[in-house]
Each structure stands twice: as structure tokens, then as C-alpha cells.
Image (tube, grey):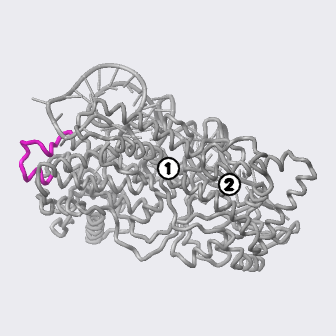
Amino acid sequence: MFIAVREEVEAAVEDALTALDLPTDDLGIEEPPEDVEAVLASSVAYRLAGEVGAPPPEVAADIAAEIDASDYGYVAEAVPQGAYVNFLPSDRFFADTLGEAQNDGYGRLEPKDTSVVVEHTSANPTGPVHVGRARNPIVGDAVANVIDYAGYDVSRHYYVNDAGRQMAVFTWAYETFDEADLEEAPERDRIEYDLVRYYRKGNAFLEEGDTDEVEAAEAEIESIMQGLEAGDEETYERVSEVVDQVLGGMRECLGRLPAEFDRFVKETKFMFDGSTDDVVDRLQDLDEAVYEEDAWQLDLEAHGIDKNLVFLRSDGTSLYPTRDLAHHEWKFENYDRAVTVLGEDHNLQAEQLRTTLDLLGNDTDQLEQVLYSYVNLPEGKMSTREGTGVDLDDLLDEAVARARKEVETRLDDRIRDDELDEDDVERIARQVGIGAVRYDIVSKQPSKAITFEWDRALDFEAQSAPYVQYVHARCCGILSEAARDDEADDLSDVDADRLDTEYERDLLRAVARFPAVIEEAADDLKPHVVATYTRTLAERFNAFYRECPVLSDDVDPELRDARLALVTAAKHSVGNALDVLGVEAPDSM
RNA sequence: GGACGUGUGGCCUAGUGGAUCAGGGCGGGAGGUUCCUAACCUCCAGAGCGUGGGUUCGAAUCCCGCCACGUCCGCCA
């Protein structure tokens, strides 16, 4: 409804300006501050004042006078206020919003005939997922969700780096060492915690081992890489044994968030199907291609990148960026748009990739790269190889444990007699604990660095997931209470005009904005605006909840039904907004 | 050294040209429950948006310099 009223306002301003013989290139449509009752406003008067030769308020008055609200369904009136033209919503706007939001898919936009592949996480399968990387699946999943809600056909991909030196080292270490060679027991009973010990052992050996032994190991690692390059099946099987196991464990960990993927695309695919060789040939033909120090490189200085892109090693093997080029061309062939979520340490690589894809004749408008800054510990960086950092599993466990404690203490002084059993406590602890972690990360602008602190990430009060989740639980509480002492309420034909207090109107206005928030978040690939929205929505709901009883005996039946419809609308809005963020919406807590 | 990014009350954060209060939260202070869950709400104190210039009728928002912090600058991924 908000999108519809915005279209009307745009049309109204444009027509008015045309009628006044003024330019319509910038309509200045914006959302007014909270204390203004209009849904939308225009600030064009500022810009046109000079041209008209009159002060802005006068221009605003002229524009407002030119608009006949009766031409529109959702605009009740255009009123000048200072230099602004404010647009007040009509009763129909509220009625239609209320009706539309009864649908439990409220917030989903019209299906678009466009496919989008969202690649995120793509962490090398070397060991447990740590918190430093956790921003990727959380932001990536939310980006995919929001694009999905916006009506696109989304595929979630995890690109598996199974062809690099790291994996060759891992494979060699896995085959060379025995359990007995490892000093420590696995930190957790899951495959990637077991196997990462071989990887760490291998790396330590290569750094500190006896020179001759290291040389022999390097030869073996080299032969694994050559084997993959040559498309050797047996080598592929050896590497896959490690990759698939580790990946399986990481997948379980990510599934706890939950972040799930439609497809795991292996890097080796592009070596085996010949597309990497094809890319190499085409790169060599480019004017930017140079052969320096026995390796083929791309000199991108003319394109603003002073670092050469090496695409073929002196031993004839390809590099990660070369295969990634083939990977992206594959995405371009199979999808209309490609979105990649990656850490800021891949910034240069991202630029080189985009520039090179362009040189190879691709339409790089299809590619959108979302960069996020790293999550650091107060002590510094996290590293899988070094074994430093906090594992995502540990963070999630701690979050759930703290949430459970919270649930238990609150259980004692609970007013509501809905008798939560042990399963409920377990469920709520999980929803709240994991929700808090996700919300804390997804609600911040990705470009800002985060220093991870337990207490801050797991604060269940205030601007947090539980605050918003609680609103959903309250909506559910009212709705189930209503169903309890009333047989099937038919809310399809309620009178929205009965919702006439400022609290009800404010809440309904917030509900109305939801689809527009989805649209904006999807267009800009910024899921955090959805998080910001949930906070406003929750505030509005709490004000309504405080001021407007729904089920009291003294509430007139018609008003009660209208309010129940509003509660339903709020429930769908807050529930679906949380769904976009990947945060569960509890029915009770 | 270069490239890119970030810099908003004690702490965290929204806001990327406009509405004479820069919005929230935490922490601090004072209150609120005969009512659909107090993981809630109300009130008080607290910043002029790193810094110096510039553009503009108007700048936290745009431009330039400087400072601080982060990331990157491998024939690693």
C-alpha cells in the first residue's frame, strides 16, 4: 500500500509541476519525520524557489493548491506545511493496508521474472567456522532472503575452494599423519574439528620441519596440485575425501544459524570442464596481458588497479582468480544477476575480478559485490590455521545457554498461565539465543567493523532480537487468547475506520511501510534496514499494546475485531521481517 | 609508501543534502503492573556528528587537506 501511495504522490507532484510549467526531474519525495502525520512529503519547493522567484513556502502552497486529492485513492489531501507539501493518507489507505496485511505472506513483492544467484560464505574447507567469518553467512543469508521476498528467483551458492594449495596441503597432511601424531584431542565431536588437526599439524610441519622432509612434502603437495590441473580423477578423489568431510561438518555448523545452500559449486568443476583453460587463452589475447617473470599476468594499471593479476603460474597451473573468472562467466550464463557477499580483505580481488570480467566481454552490471568488514576479537584477528579465535559453534552454544538461564529466571515471575514445558524452554532458549546473535550482526551496516564482545552480542534487552521477538509472541498471545473464548472470528470484513487513535494509526502506518522496506533493502542489498524497521515496528506495537486493550470486556465487538485484525497485521509484518533477517519468531516466550 | 573503507553522547548504534529537539539503545538517576506475558513503558542528565577548509539558500550527509583506526598491496585463497 505504501508503494501504491508513493506512486500516487509521485504522479500528483509531477502533474502539479507540469501544470505550473516547472521542471519535474527531481520530485523531492521523502518520508517525513515521525511527528508529522503525513505518510509522504515533497521538498521540491526548496529547489524551485529560485526558479519561481518566490520563497519556498509560497511555492509549496502553489503546488499543494494544484493537487486535487479526489483524483487519487490513497491520498486524502496535499497540505503545504512550511516549505513542504505533505500528503495525508486516506481512509482507504488504512483499510486496504489492514486487509492486505491479513495475508500471512505480507511483505512479499510481486514475483519478477529474474533469477539471482547469491554466493556467500564460501569459506575454505579447512576447519571449523569461526566468528570472524560468521558475518558472511548471516549477512549473506539475509541478503538472499530479502531478494527472495522482493520477488526474485534466488539460488544460494557456496563456492568451494577445493583446488588451491591449502587443500593440497590438507590432503597431504591427512594422508601423511596419523591420529598418534596429533597432540590434541578434537575440541568438539564433529568431523571438521577432528580433521582440522591434520591441517594445523601439516602447516606446523612445513614451517618447522626438517629441511629434507619439508622438501619431500612440498613435492607431494605440488603433485596434488598438478594432478588437479591435469584433470586427474584419482587426485580429485583424494582431495575430495578431505574436502567433502570437512565441508559436511561446516555445513552442519552453518545449519544451526540456520544458513542453508541450494548448491555447493566446486572450483575444480571449472578446471575439469575446460572453462579455465578457455579463460586463460582469452586472457592471453588481451592487450593487458604481459609475460613477466615466467608467469602470465594482466596489467590493470590503465584501469586503476596498480597490482598485476597473475593468471597462470610459471609451472603452467592456474590460480584461484583464474578459476573464479570461469566461475563467474558460468554464473552469468545461468543467472540474470549474480550477487557475492565477501569480506573486505577480498576488496582488491573483487575489483580485479570485475575489471577482468569486463575486459573478457562480460556485462558486469550483472555482478553486485557486497563487502563487509571483519569481526575481530578484542585481542585481535582470528585464524583457522593458527587455531585462534572463537568457533561459531561455541558462540551459539553460549548464546543458547545464556538464553536458557534467562528463560528460567523469568519463568518464576510469570503472570501468564500457559505452562511452558521443558520443550518450550529449550525451543525459546534456542530461538532467543541464536536470534540475538544473528540480529546483533545483521542489524549493523556491513561496512563497519565489529569487535566481538560476549556481553554485547548476548544482551537480551533493548535493541535486540528478543525485544522484537517478544512483540511477535505478544501478538500470538492475544490472537490465541481471542480464539480461546470465541469461535472463529471472521476478520475479513472489519471496519478499519474504527482504528482511530494515534497509536493504532501509527502502528498501521508502520505496517504499511513493510513492503517498501523490503523493496529498498533488496535494491540496495542492505538487509540491516529491515532490522532498523523491526525496531520501529516493535516500538509502535508496544505503544498500541499499552494504550489499546483488545480483549477487555469493555471493548465494543466491532472495535475488538478491528484491533484483532491490526494485531494480525502486525504479527505478519514483524514475523516476516524477522524471517528476512533469518531470526525465528516465537509464538510464546 | 599506495589503494580502499571507517570515524556520531562514557560505550554501542540509526541517519548519505533539507521540517529551529541529530533518532535509538547500553550504562547512570527517578518512576510505572487491580489491564491481552514488565524480555515492556514513562521521565531526567548526556553529543552538534574525528579535525581544518570549501561547495550550497541549506551539510553528520557532497568536495579537498590532515589525523586516527581497519583491510589489502604473494606465481595463498
In the rendered image, residue A557 lying in the magenta stretch gets the answer yes
Give the residue pinned by disc 1: A445
Secondary structure beneath disc 2? loop
* Residue A168 occupies quadrant: bottom right
Say which amino acid is labelled 2.
Thr
Q: Residue at x 59, y 55 (%)?
A: A249
Instruction: State if disc 2 and disc 1 touch (CB < 8 Å).
Output: no
Which amino acid, mark 1? Answer: Gln
Quarter containing the C terminus of chain A: top left
SS of the residue at dot 1?
A: loop
Q: Chain of mark 1?
A: A
Q: Which residues are drawn in magenta?
A: A546-562
Which residue lies under the disc numbered 2?
A126
The residue located at (27%, 55%) in the rendering is A511
| Side of A224 relative to A394 (left or right) | right
- Residue B48: x and y in percent read 47, 36
Q: Give the Cα distance between marks 1 and 2.
A: 28 Å
The mark that comes first in sequence, 1 or 2, is 2
- Taking A146 as reference, is B69 left or right? right
Identified at 58% across, 66% down, the residue is A264
Report how many numbered discs are placed on residues in the image: 2
Which is more foreground, mark 1 or mark 2?
Answer: 2
Q: Nearer the viewer, residue A400 or A375?
A: A400
Crowding around mark 1 (Cα neighbors within 10 Å: few <14, some 14 to 19, many 20+) is some
The image's mark for residue A25 is none
